[in-house]
Image (spheres, grey):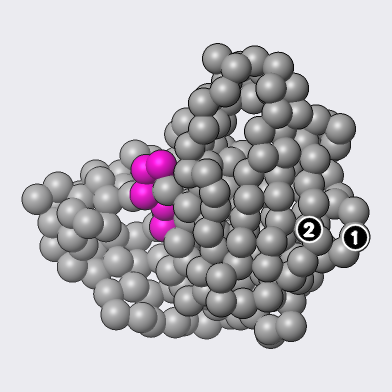
Amino acid sequence: QKEVEQDPGPLSVPEGAIVSLNCTYSNSAFQYFMWYRQYSRKGPELLMYTYSSGNKEDGRFTAQVDKSSKYISLFIRDSQPSDSATYLCAMSAGNTPLVFGKGTRLSVIA
Amino acid sequence: GAVVSQHPSWVICKSGTSVKIECRSLDFQATTMFWYRQFPKQSLMLMATSNEGSKATYEQGVEKDKFLINHASLTLSTLTVTSAHPEDSSFYICSGRDTRRAQETQYFGPGTRLLVL
């Protein structure tokens, strides 16, 4: 079993839809959870950062972490064509390199 | 957020030549920097981790004599691809982490696209 599993998609939704992106993981030592957005031919951009379990909201983005289920989610409300990108989950046990999911390719169709 | 720059953004070189890529943290001190490579439609593959002033730690399967990493200051790390071959063509991305902060986040550069002919 890989440390971090993420459905690669592609995921295609109409503009305005709510998007749900998810990752599961196996290492119970992970405490720091991040979501990055990567546009084609660009470096990843940090979207959300969460420590331990709970929810965090930033504008149209909500990140959820459920450590008991080893499951994290990113929700995008009122999705826009500009949200079309690859979304990478990443996590760390602390003072260690991030472990990334494979990324989910999202297309928001106008 | 913190800003990381990379130079050059793309480079084309002949097989057998060496290429140096610079990674700079512009508004924070990156005590730790990471180098990744990424093939089309694939995720990031960690190549090495470097801490300022010490030797880099390479991931399994990455040739340290081929991919030379220098992290001489808190704001600059360089990756030199020596004797480049076409199979080294890839997207190279660096990231920096300020370990003096509580957060474990990494901030990524825009990437360098390398094409070896």
Position of residue A64 measured from the top left corner of the image (x, y, whole percent): 47, 74
Height in image: A49 above or below B117?
below
The residue at 56%/76% (across/down) is B27
- Spatial CA distance of label 2 from label 1 is 7 Å
In magenta stretch: residue A40: yes
Height in image: B40 above or below A59?
above
Height in image: A108 above or below A68?
above
Q: Which amino acid does the dot numbered 1 rest on?
A: Ser
- Start-end of magenta stretch: A37-41
Q: Is residue A51 left or right of residue A110?
A: right
Q: Is residue A110 visible?
A: yes
Which sits in the foreground, B50 or B12? Answer: B12
The residue at 52%/74% (across/down) is B2
Which sits in the foreground, A60 or B34? Answer: B34
Position of residue A55 measured from the top left corner of the image (x, y, whole percent): 46, 81
Q: Chain of mark 1?
A: B
